[in-house]
């Protein structure tokens, strides 16, 4: 059984603290080159290796990450 | 990208923002542990279905505006006096879940007398204690829990025990009191740690209805602005230094 997942980031709330990046086991989050309206470089999905483990969302202090997961 | 947009459906959602958190953007610095702890408190209250039976007592400190972020009933205590207010609230409304949310400047410094006597009386409340070893809100001054040698704005050469005394291990101190039921020290720097802290907070809320005494959950946290580190570096510094003085784990559990 394998999982395929993805995340959705509320970029206007994201403060770019990068705690999610270090907690992602598959290294699929990065900071965007662009900034949001507050001037923070927000987190974004870097590749499609996300398995929907929700580690990033759990450690996110601002609760900006929504995690989706399906069995494949 | 088609696969990803296929996955993004409400029925596939496994984790999201708890409904109990309000839409206000938190005023905390990027990477602050307060946000994570607020989130797990909201999750626990939501999962237990006790939104209308929970009263929080917010402290003075960075988390003074906690009442703006979690959609439950709140009271705002004077500096350090949250356990006293919680005592009154719980005694007057014994059917409510009452918790205080305090930082180390609030609980371990000005509020030492209140917390010690609340523990000694064995009040059936939950105390969530955020220990980041510094006064974050006022600009990074030394707190009682500041580590030896740690640089703060009032100890620019590092904390010297001869001048500033030793760090206060308040959680171990409170575990020695007979009125406490559940004493634990946790952290929120990784997903595993967040899960453990969430279980501890849930246990605390459950114990507060079992009439066994006070539940005290210390969360070793970071203050990246006060420590002058990036959020990721602050987490690494916490693991390397704070956990040596403040080791994680359950210290006391009377029902075990």
Image: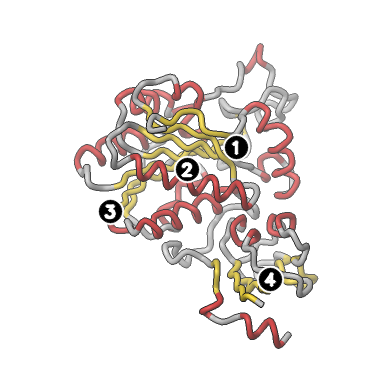
Which badge, 3 or 1, comes first in the chain's sequence? 3
Element type where label 2 sits in the image: helix
Judging by the rendered image, the residue that carries numbered circle 2 is B200
Judge depth for marks 4 and 3 and give the one in front.
4
Judging by the rendered image, the residue that carries numbered circle 3 is B53
Q: Could you give the CA–CA distance between mark 3 and mark 1, rounded to whole angstroms?
A: 30 Å
Depth check: B166 or B182 in front? B182
Q: Are marks 4 and 3 on the same chain?
A: no
Judge depth for marks 3 and 2 and give the one in front.
2
**Residue found at the very far front of the displayed protein:** A1
Residue in the image at 63% along x and 71% along y:
A9
* Residue A21 - label: none
Q: Are marks 4 and 1 on the same chain?
A: no
Q: Return the chain for callout 2.
A: B
**Residue found at the very far top of the displayed protein:** B162
Judge depth for marks 1 and 2 and give the one in front.
2
**Residue found at the very far left of the displayed protein:** B92
Snapshot quadrant of residue A59:
bottom right
Judging by the rendered image, the residue that carries numbered circle 4 is A2
Q: Could you give the CA–CA distance between mark 1 and mark 2, rounded to whole angstroms?
A: 19 Å
Residue in the image at 76% along x and 67% along y:
A28
Judging by the rendered image, the residue that carries numbered circle 1 is B132
Residue in the image at 60% along x and 22% along y:
B167
Judge depth for marks 2 and 4 and give the one in front.
4
Judge depth for marks 4 and 1 and give the one in front.
4
Element type where label 4 sits in the image: loop
Depth check: B190 or B151 in front? B190
Q: Return the chain for callout 4.
A: A
């Amino acid at each position: 059984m394998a999982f395929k997942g993805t995340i959705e980031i509320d970029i206007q709330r994201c403060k770019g603290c990068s705690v999610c990046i270090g907690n992602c086991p598959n290294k699929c989050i990065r900071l965007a080159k662009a900034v949001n309206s507050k001037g923070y470089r927000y987190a974004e999905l870097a590749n499609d290796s996300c398995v929907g483990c929700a580690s990033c969302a759990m450690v996110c202090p601002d609760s900006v990450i929504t995690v989706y997961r399906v069995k494949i | 990208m088609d696969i990803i947009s296929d996955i993004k459906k409400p029925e596939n959602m496994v984790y999201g923002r708890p409904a109990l958190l309000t839409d206000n953007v938190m005023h905390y610095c990027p990477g602050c542990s307060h946000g994570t702890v607020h989130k797990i408190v909201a999750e626990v209250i939501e999962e237990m279905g006790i939104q209308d039976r929970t009263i929080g007592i917010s402290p003075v400190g960075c988390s003074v505006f906690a009442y703006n972020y979690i959609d439950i009933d709140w009271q705002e205590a004077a500096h350090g006096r949250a356990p006293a207010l919680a005592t009154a609230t719980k005694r007057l409304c014994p059917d409510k879940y009452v918790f205080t949310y305090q930082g180390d400047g609030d609980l371990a410094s000005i509020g030492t007398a209140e917390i010690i006597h609340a523990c000694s009386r064995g009040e059936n409340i939950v105390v969530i204690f955020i220990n980041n070893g510094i006064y974050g809100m006022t600009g990074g001054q030394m707190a009682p829990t500041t580590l030896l040698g740690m640089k703060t704005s009032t100890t620019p050469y590092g904390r010297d025990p001869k001048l500033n005394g030793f760090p206060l291990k308040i959680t171990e101190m409170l575990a020695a009191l007979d009125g406490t039921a559940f004493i634990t020290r946790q952290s929120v720097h990784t997903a595993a740690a967040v899960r453990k802290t969430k279980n501890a907070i849930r246990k605390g809320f459950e114990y507060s209805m079992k009439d066994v005494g006070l539940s005290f959950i210390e969360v070793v946290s970071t203050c990246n602005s006060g420590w002058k580190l990036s959020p990721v570096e602050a987490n690494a510094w916490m693991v390397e230094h704070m956990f040596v003085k403040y080791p994680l784990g359950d210290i006391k559990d009377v029902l075990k």
